[in-house]
Image (cartoon, rainbow, N blue to C red):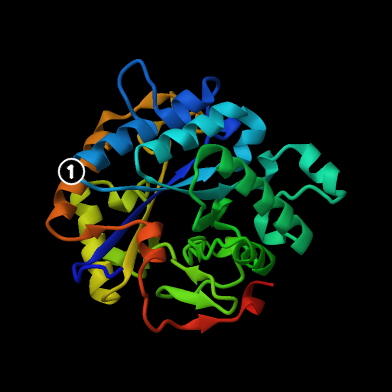
Amino acid sequence: MTLSQKPKLMITVDVEAFPKRAADRHLDKLIWGRFTEGEGGILAMMRIAEKHGARLTMFTDLAEVGLYGDAMIEVAQEIDRRGHDLELHCHPEFMPGQVWDEVGIRQLRLLNDASPEQAEATVKYLLAAYAQASTKSPVAFRGGSYRFNSALLRALAKAGVMIDSSYNPSKPKQSRVHELRAAFNWSNGVLELPISCLPDYNGAPDLTDFNFNVGRLSTAEKMLDFLTKFHAAYPGEIAVLVMHSWSFSKPSGSDVVHYDLWREDEVVRFSRFLELVAGYADVVTTRDVAATEMGSLATYDLSEVD
């Protein structure tokens, strides 16, 4: 498969429902986006993307099957049924304790601390959950809070998951490497698609990552401006946008944790952004990339993230 010569954009959504982010109805509020006032969450995201002929890459936290059981599998099934790109996401603290008891190892809390045994147990659990939702096999992974390490990258490659999109140099606490990089290969063959970042964006003193919920990108026009500046700085690169399943909601009252309120303006912003993108870039998924010859890329040794 070959991609067109137009600039490329990958719209990624971390699909997750942390218990601390809602007082109740966690899946409805944080993933499905079912509010009395209107529709948000992945239902609105998929509907808007479909209207514009785009597919989303949806990194779904299947560790949360440990919290929500079959209800989380149903989330993954709906993503897959509608033709979006169902891929793996993981906050391992939500995996059930019996997973670790059965293999006799300590429970993993942070992916960048994973031992080889913990990494393999984590990937095995995710793949088993994925198999309940789709007849396909996953091709890509994103670590919770952008965390990853060499043991995890090795376990992913062993399982045939050859794309990672956890590298975010604007979040230096999440890995041991913080420099700006274009897409690259790890030394075990895993392709890394970094979260798109720009230095000094509109005078900002630090790196700005391409995140739907970053205040510097508060309008569709600002998002397009970031996108075009990224492609000017990195010609031919795939721009990776990060969203979350709760991106169309906001905290209620003075509560900075519970995302209980629907934000129609954010739904409108996403729709407007896709309207602007339609004449500029092609929206691609990790499956498109997996089927594409990426050409010559830099290679970095896994020892960087040991």
Query: Residue at point 68% right, 51% down?
Result: 124
| Left or right relative to 248: residue 50 | left
Mark 1: which secondary structure? helix
Q: Position of residue 147 (x, y in %)?
A: 59, 58
Tally of numbered tags? 1
| Left or right relative to 215: residue 50 | left
125 w.r.t. 245: above or below: below
Res 18 → quadrant: top right
Query: Residue at point 54% right, 57% down?
Result: 146
Residue type for callout 1: Arg
Q: Quadrant of the C terminus?
A: bottom right
Closest to the observer: 303 or 220?
Answer: 303
Q: Which residue is mark 1?
A: 272
Closest to the observer: 280 or 224?
Answer: 280
Closest to the observer: 142 or 126?
Answer: 126
Residue 23 visible, this orientation: yes
Q: Position of residue 267 (x, y in %)?
A: 27, 35
Question: Around disc 1, counting alpha carbons within 10 Å, would you say few (fewer than 14), some (14 to 19), or many (20 or more)?
Answer: some
**Residue at the far top in the pictured view:** 36
Residue 254 visible, this orientation: no
Res 116 → quadrant: bottom right
Q: Quadrant of the N terminus?
A: bottom left
157 w.r.t. 15: above or below: below
**Residue at the far left in the pictured view:** 279
Q: Position of residue 119 (x, y in %)?
A: 71, 58
Closest to the observer: 27 or 262?
Answer: 27
| Left or right relative to 158: residue 179 | left
Query: Residue at point 29% right, 59% down?
Result: 9
Query: Residue at point 37% right, 20% down?
Result: 35
